Amino acid sequence: MKKVMVGMSGGVDSSVAAMMLRDMGYEVMGVTLKLFSDEDISEAQKEGKTCCALSDVEDARSVAYRLGFEHIVFNFKDNFREYVMKQFADSYLCGRTPNPCIECNRHVKFDKMLRRAMELGYDYIATGHYAVNEYDEDKGRYLLKRPADRSKDQTYVLYALTQEQLSYTLFPLGGLEKKQVREKAESAGLVNSQKPDSQDICFVPDGDYAAFIRRFTGCDTPCGSFVDMDGKVLGEHKGIINYTIGQRKGLGIALGHPAYVVKKDIAANTVTLGLESDLYTKSLIADDFNLISVEKLEAPMRVTAKTRYSQKEQPALVSYLGNGEYMVEFDEPQRAVTSGQAVVIYDGDIVVGGGTIK
């Protein structure tokens, strides 16, 4: 009997994933990852709103008990703090806008948890992500594909998975709609069948990124100048970590017309404001690239691409520039392309790969 370690967040998706694997005949163990301590998020901690709150551990344990398999908790706080929380704070301080879910998948769930599973003699790990993982005999490669429920597609945050990691990973929910998952949970009497999905970054449950960065690093960015597209000073900003590209609300400045954050310059400590039309660009350069469906990009390739989790993929051309850098040129200008975010490229339903926008 094959053994699988299932990452269980306490939510309905990972619970149903574990149940499905049990029903397929796998020997299942549920694992909840303790990723941070209360002091790491201070007063922002809101019980029940984060993915490793006490109630979530209890929900995961309750499901495992009901389904008849073992459940344990792994303490990965140090790993999470170093590779996710610190990276998140450092990126913001450098003027970038990171995606911590991608780094958590890259360094914690599909690295640290996978290695622990292998050490304990498990054949696979599994999660409740909505994605499809298939082996292509002709290509001799594992392919990451979009799931049946396009509205829940999570391939954007999984683009960093390597061939080795994919070879040990199962995504049981890839062929299901979210409605079907909840129905399965309800039929089985699982305690979390109607539990709402988590919407927030787990370690910033109140959504105040700047306050988290100040608490976590002890650093604050000084006030500086708002400038227009020509460099003319418009007023004073409250510190560069308080702003993201495309932001319109909460700027604290009245210009007589809608203004948007178009650029952040750490060296000059300026935030450039412009019109919405100034937010659009047709190309980007990305590095830290991971290719899944191909070993390397031999020639420019027609793809679809997206630069945000919730964005619809857009037609584009991707080219390798050398030195680990790739250029993505869109057919139509894209709004608020942001350094630090990921660009993920697709060939139909197949994830070609992705990287970090420079």
Image (cartoon, grey):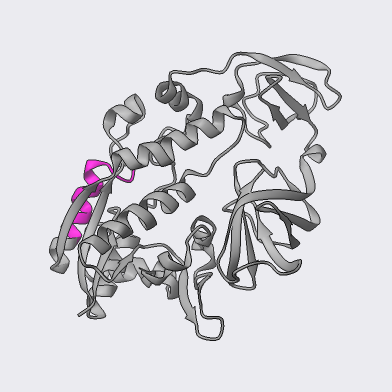
Q: Within the image, what quadrant is residue 223 found in?
A: top right
Magenta-colored stretch includes residue 162: no
The image shows residue 344, relative to residue 132, as above or below, that is above
**Bounds of the magenta span?**
50-63
Q: Is residue 285 left or right of residue 205?
A: right
The image shows residue 59, relative to residue 292, as above or below, that is above
Rendered-image quadrant of the N terminus:
bottom left
> Can residue 194 be seen by looking at this rendering?
no
Q: Within the image, what quadrant is residue 91 found in?
A: top right
> Can residue 302 be seen by looking at this rendering?
yes
The number of numbered discs placed on residues in the rendered structure image is 0
> Looking at this rendering, what residue extends furthest in the right direction?
230
Q: Residue at x 28, y 44 (%)?
A: 76
Q: Nearer the viewer, residue 138 or 185?
A: 138
Q: Nearer the viewer, residue 288 or 231?
A: 288
> Looking at this rendering, what residue extends furthest in the front direction?
323
Rendered-image quadrant of the C terminus:
top right
Residue 156's spot in the image, x, y percent? 54, 58
Magenta-colored stretch includes residue 51: yes
Q: Nearer the viewer, residue 312 or 239?
A: 239
Residue 69's spot in the image, x, y percent? 15, 66
Q: Is residue 210 left or right of residue 171?
A: right
Q: Residue at x 47, y 37 (%)?
A: 87
Q: Within the image, what quadrant is residue 276 found in?
A: top right
Residue 147's spot in the image, x, y percent? 50, 70
Residue 326's spot in the image, x, y percent? 70, 55
Dominant secondary structure, magenta = helix
Q: Is residue 124 left or right of residue 250?
A: left
The image shows residue 69, relative to residue 236, as above or below, that is below
Q: Residue at x 68, y 67 (%)?
A: 297
